[in-house]
Amino acid sequence: MNGKCWKFGDDVNTDDITPARYLDTTDERELAAHCMEGADPEFVRKAHAGDLIVAGKNFGCGSSREHAPIAIKAFGIACVVAESFARIFFRNSINIGLPIAECPEAARQASEGDELEVDFKQGRIVNRTTGGTYSFPPFPEQLRRIIEAGGLMAFTRKLKGGEL
Amino acid sequence: MGMTITEKILAAHSDRDAVRPGDYILADVDLCMGNDITAPIAIEEFERAGFQQVWDPARIALVPDHFTPNKDIKSAGLAKKLRLFAAKHKIAHYWEVGRVGIEHVLLPEQGLVAPGELIIGADSHTCTYGALGAFSTGVGSTDLAACFATGKVWLRVPGSLRFVLRGKLPRWVGGKDLILYTIGRIGVDGALYKAMEFCGPAIASLPMDERFTMCNMAIEAGGKSGIIAPDQATRAYCEGRAQSPATIYQSDPDASYAEAFEWDVSGLSPQVSAPFLPSNSRPVEEFSEVEIDQVVIGSCTNGRLSDLRTAAELLRGRKAAPGVRLLVFPATQQVYLQALKEGLLEVFVEAEGAVSPPTCGPCLGGHMGVLAEGERALATTNRNFRGRMGHPGSEVYLCGPAVAAASAVTGRITHPEEVVSEEPPVTSERGKR
């Protein structure tokens, strides 16, 4: 996947991604319409499906609200690259199939508007604007099984069905 | 090599003799919990996946506490989704308005948490129950949906940070001050993916209510869980309350920690965290020029009986400053009733504060105290992110109940000592002086 990157700082919290006033719905289109609104009210007007979010440390900290990764995924963000992720946001992303990559150097050295290419098979990020190439470790086996099953619910169906 | 209390609980719940930090386990859950914001997504995921039956209706708790009493039509729809699911699946632990309280105060109070258990909740502050020597952690809605179906959760075994707190706490300094101080020292990602284990003499003498407050905010340092090994205070709390037997674990003397911290807290001032991160904590004295529009006393962090007693001690015979809106939220109906019997609610009303039914409402800018642009609140809640309590141009400062109550009286952030050292208050029993 490759796309234009939108840059955010450290400690972007889930209130930034999906402010609580939009938690009165479970509809992913409604949530997508307010994606990142607390951090940048203009985001949904500037960004496009296929773009990437690039952020600093502790992305997605705060509330457990899954509405936040749902909003990002439903908006069409191809991948979130960050120096690090808060743990509930991390597991929510794995569970619902929002691609995320923890790659401190790539995140730090990218500027807004750079074209990034993320290759999960190779564990590699190429910044096509600057030419920088970065590697990140693959997810551990246990998480890959969830991802490859198509998310936690599909994994759980298999688990219950005795396939795992 | 020994294990920490956290590793022991996780090993026991995954049929292993031992686990190590970094291990992935599929753990058996003793209780899972969701609220009116997170559970609706879990219910939809559960049903979309085609599951017909929950794993065990006696081990699921659904707590409509965030936008209740229903704040608007859409929120009423979310609460209704919980109600219908609870009825359909005969969920044992579901509470309607009038019985419901804030989840992280309600579940321990109702005896649904016992030492040694493993509890997950689709709410980040689920880490609260570690105060009872349980492993508890916040997860997402899909995790909850999967747990509805299987009773299991995938976990990476966290490394542990050990916090040894020494010394005797000064007056007006409590669990909230200790945790704000701790977060200030290590930062909002200082415990990322880690279990925060609190121990030492200052913890041993800390009442249960304040232990809950400390573990509640482990997430604000990025922690996976907070935990305090059970002792006499834990046993006393569980006596006649806990619905399942306790399993007492202690960390081994040779357990391995990612890092250890040791602080003497004898000289600690009450702490206040400035916007927009809980880690911006400093002594209350540094904020004495900060004027406030609203004071919120309550939440899963500080809405327990002892919090209300502390606040009432300072507000008795005094009034909220002109221009200050004082809001008090007893966290559960039981807390509310006891506060009523003890005359605490009378104190708050006479102080010209508004007493609300139990709800998470204002903490997350939901309802019952949302801030306008440019307004500033001082709150005993747990987050001061930009826009957390309302307009993105509003501010939240965090503190414990004593500082909140004292500041309500003066209209600016105030050390409780300043209020008590002024002329003695008028008390309603003795009439006007």
Image (spheres, coloured by chain):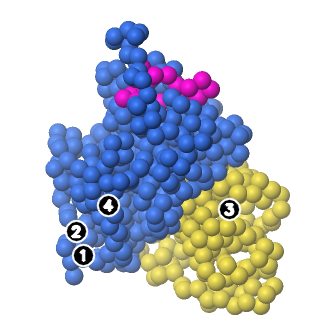
**The numbered mark 4 sits on a residue in which chain?**
B
Q: Regarding mark 2 in the picture, which secondary structure is present there?
A: loop
Label 4 element class: strand
Please tell me the numbered disc located at residue B142: none
> Are discs 3 and 2 both within one chain?
no
- Identify the image quadrant of the C terminus of chain A: bottom left
Q: Amino acid at mark 3?
A: Ile
Q: Residues within 10 Å of mark 4 (few under 14, many from 20)?
A: some
Circles 2 and 1 in contact, beta carbons < 8 Å = yes
User: What distance separates the C-alpha of mark 4 from that of mark 3?
Assistant: 44 Å
Q: Residue furthest top?
A: B431
Residue A138 rendering spot, x and y as whole percentages: 54, 85
CA gap, disc 4 and disc 1: 23 Å
Q: Quadrant of the N terminus of chain A?
A: bottom right
User: Which residue is situated farthest in the right direction here?
Assistant: A46
Look at mark 1 in the image and give the residue it sits on.
Answer: B255
What residue is pinned by disc 3? A72
Q: On the picture, is B424 further left or further right than B190?
A: left
Label 3 vs label 2, nearer the camera: 2
Q: Amino acid at mark 1?
A: Ala
**Badge 3 sits on which subunit?**
A
The residue nearer to you, when weighing A112 against B65, is A112
- Residue of label 4: B264
Circle 2 is placed at which residue position? B251
Q: Is residue A5 above or below residue B183?
A: below
Q: Nearer the viewer, mark 4 or mark 2?
A: 4
**Chain drawn in blue:** B
**Crowdedness of circle 2 by 10 Å Cα count: few (<14), some, many (20+)?**
some
